[in-house]
Image (cartoon, helix red, strand yellow):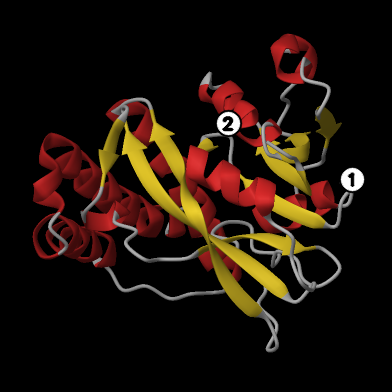
């Protein structure tokens, strides 16, 4: 498989074994993988991460997700940047798509498909349903970059951009267990609350409870989360808790 001149950029602030699988899936089809360590993560504690000559470690100051991703991209040897998370593994079809990719110009942003997993099980309905949703992840850094949002960041899309979806998908191993999913949800709820406070967003008393209840009903019933069985129940419950915590933390000093 020929490696496309793409620099894969991954922020890492904690260890999960799946990161090795993630790295392997991209070194097979891309020319470089950059790991951006932040939050006290030390590469010397995990020497197996840098054994592949295509993998390079970079230490970064944390400036929120959007800005820190842009900082990592500046260290890349290529202009084409593929930004993924530590738990986002490219399937074989996506690897093939990346290896054959030869963009005709820089004004293209490539979208990827995705399937989320909880505890090793795919979740195809409810809040984690992706369908034909496009995840914008591959771009030319001379043309665009990530916005500076601290959480729920996105790639800026200029008016003359062309969006192309690549065949294949990312398998997103969101959490190894429900307990891990809940810990992750609480972390993102705090980040979202901080973002809303900066925006001086107003909330009415009881919004956390009402929004959480609506979130669960919408995801589990109307978006067919129940079709995923117990995993669907866990995802709907976890997302409802995230919604409640987000508004609860906004009211904290």
29 or 65: nearer the viewer: 29
Give the residue drawn at x 87%, y 46%. 76
Q: Is residue 177 left or right of residue 252?
A: left
Which image quadrant is residue 238 in? Answer: top left
Q: Is residue 62 left or right of residue 201?
A: right
Q: Dot 1: few (<14), some (14–19), or many (≥20) neighbours within 10 Å?
A: some
Residue 89 at x, y percent in the picture: 52, 36
Q: Secondary structure at mark 1?
A: loop
Q: Secondary structure at mark 2?
A: helix
Residue 137 at x, y percent in the picture: 62, 58
- The numbered disc on residue 169 is none
Instruction: Look at mark 2 in the image and give the residue it sits on.
Output: 22
Instruction: Look at mark 1 in the image and give the residue it sits on.
Output: 75
Residue 129 at x, y percent in the picture: 29, 56
124 or 1: nearer the viewer: 1
Which image quadrant is residue 145 in? Answer: bottom right
Is residue 99 placed above or below 152 in the rendered structure?
above
Give the residue drawn at x 64%, y 79%. 162
Whether residue 154 is visible, yes or no, is no
Residue 214 at x, y percent in the picture: 17, 65
Q: CA distance from mark 1 to mark 2?
A: 20 Å
Give the residue drawn at x 51%, y 24%. 18
22 or 12: nearer the viewer: 22
Q: Disc 1 or 2, which lies upstream in sequence?
A: 2
């Amino acid at each position: 498989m020929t490696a496309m001149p793409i620099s894969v950029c991954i922020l890492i602030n904690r260890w999960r074994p799946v990161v090795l699988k993630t790295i392997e899936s991209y070194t097979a089809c891309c020319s470089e993988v950059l790991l951006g360590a932040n939050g006290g993560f030390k590469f010397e504690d995990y020497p197996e991460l840098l054994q592949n000559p295509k993998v390079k470690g970079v230490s970064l100051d944390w400036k929120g997700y959007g800005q820190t991703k842009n900082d990592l991209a500046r260290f890349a040897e290529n202009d084409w940047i593929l930004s993924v998370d530590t738990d986002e593994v490219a399937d074989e079809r996506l690897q093939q798509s990346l290896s054959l990719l030869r963009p005709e110009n820089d004004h293209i942003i490539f979208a990827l498909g995705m399937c989320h997993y909880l505890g090793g099980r795919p979740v195809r309905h409810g809040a984690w349903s992706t369908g034909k949703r496009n995840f914008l992840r591959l771009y030319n850094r001379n043309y665009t970059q990530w916005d500076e949002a601290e959480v729920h960041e996105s790639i800026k899309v200029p008016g003359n951009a062309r969006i192309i979806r690549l065949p294949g998908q990312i398998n997103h191993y969101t959490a190894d267990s429900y307990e891990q999913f809940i810990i992750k949800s609480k972390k993102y709820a705090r980040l979202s609350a901080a973002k809303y406070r900066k925006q001086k967003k107003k909330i009415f008393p009881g919004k956390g409870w009402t929004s959480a209840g609506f979130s669960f009903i919408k995801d589990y019933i109307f978006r067919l989360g129940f079709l995923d069985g117990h995993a669907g129940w866990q995802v709907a419950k976890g997302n409802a808790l995230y919604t409640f915590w987000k508004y609860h933390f906004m009211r904290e000093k």
